[in-house]
């Protein structure tokens, strides 16, 4: 059984992400970078190849967490904007 990628935390919000990507090119770039980094982290942690230095992995984890924070902020603003429109 294949292990799930723990870095893909926004899977339940794909509709909002797709909408944001259409209206905001900067969000699209940030989310694309997040996807690339999270996939690469998952691959590094689950490979049997040459070991990768912990400092490098920790730097990738830190950068991925910064991207997650930025994406979360955008999603919160997007959801608030949607809620305001409904009222």
Image (cartoon, grey):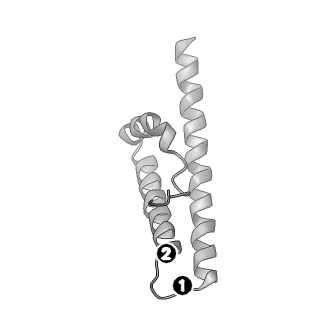
Q: In the structure shown, which secondary structural element does the residue marked by tag 1 occupy?
A: loop
| Residue at 47% across, 88% down | 50
Q: Residues within 10 Å of mark 1 (few under 14, many from 20)?
A: few
Q: Which mark is residue 73?
A: none
Q: Nearer the viewer, residue 46 or 31?
A: 46
Q: Would you say 37 lies left or right of 80 here?
A: left
Residue 18, relative to residue 62: is it above or below?
above
The reply to whether discs 1 and 2 touch (Cβ–Cβ < 8 Å) is yes
- Residue highlighted by disc 1: 52
| Residue at 52% across, 17% down | 85
Q: Which of marks 1 and 2 is nearer the N terminus?
A: 2
- Residue highlighted by disc 2: 44
Q: Which of 20 and 34 is in front in this view?
A: 34
Where does the image place residue 48, in percent across and percent down from the top left? 46, 81
Distance of mark 1 from mark 2, alpha carbons? 7 Å
In the image, farthest residue toward the bottom: 50
């Amino acid at each position: 059984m294949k292990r799930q990628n723990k870095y893909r935390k926004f899977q339940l919000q794909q509709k909002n992400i797709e909408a944001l990507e259409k209206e905001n090119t900067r969000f699209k770039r940030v989310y694309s970078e997040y996807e690339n980094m999270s996939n690469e982290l998952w691959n590094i942690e689950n490979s049997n190849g040459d070991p990768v230095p912990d400092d490098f992995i920790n730097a990738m984890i830190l950068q991925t967490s910064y991207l997650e924070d930025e994406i979360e902020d955008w999603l919160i603003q997007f959801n608030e904007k949607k809620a305001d429109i409904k009222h």
